[in-house]
Amino acid sequence: MLLNRMTPMGSLGRFSRDMDRLFDEVFRVSRAPYSRPAGYPSLNVWEDGDAFVVEAEVPGLTLDKLSVDVLGNELTISGERNDAPAEITTIHRRERGAGSFQRTLTLPTDINAEAVAADLKNGILTIRLPKAETAKVRRIEVKPHD
């Protein structure tokens, strides 16, 4: 007869892993939904003083296949990825998407479109979007009443 010693913590950990696997399979829920990209290209966005900075992953894209547009408080990144083989061949796996794409991001304030700067280096598109003057905080001097 084979006896297995069971500990409460070991059983609880196994039960937790089994439940996570069940929910992932049934509901297709990720454990960290914030880490999965919402579309292509994947973006990081942050605010740096008087501007927003957007980084987009666009590996393999060249400048002639990429477009950046700003209107009001919306940034649109569009382009085309052509990953098709040059000649007809047998494809065994295709995980990288191909074709045209467009991703629009709505920012919390209007952007000064004249001062937007974009740079493409090592497959990372970095866009600096200065806020419009009307969106910047102005300190108002309060004067005493005489």
Image: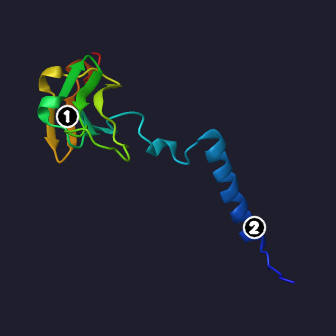
The front one of 46 and 18 is: 18
In which image quadrant can residue 58 be found?
A: top left
Q: Amino acid at mark 2?
A: Ser
- Residue located at (66% from left, 42% from top): 26
Q: Amino acid at mark 1?
A: Arg
Could you classify mark 2 by the number of other residues whose Cα lies within 10 Å: few (under 14), some (14-19), or many (20 or more)?
Answer: few
Image location of residue 86, percent across then percent down? 19, 39
Image location of residue 117, percent across then percent down? 14, 32
Mark number displayed over residue 11: 2
State the CA–CA distance, disc 2 to disc 1: 51 Å
The residue under label 1 is: 128
The front one of 24 and 138 is: 24
Secondary structure beneath dot 1 equals: strand
Q: Is residue 77 above or below residue 95?
A: above
- Residue located at (27% from left, 20% from top): 110
In which image quadrant can residue 131 be found?
A: top left
Q: Are marks 2 and 1 in contact (CB under 8 Å)?
A: no
**Residue at the extreme bottom of the image, as rendered:** 1
In the picture, the quarter occupied by the C terminus is top left
Image location of residue 32, percent across then percent down? 52, 47
Q: Is residue 139 visible?
A: no
Image location of residue 59, percent across then percent down? 23, 43
Secondary structure beneath dot 2 equals: helix
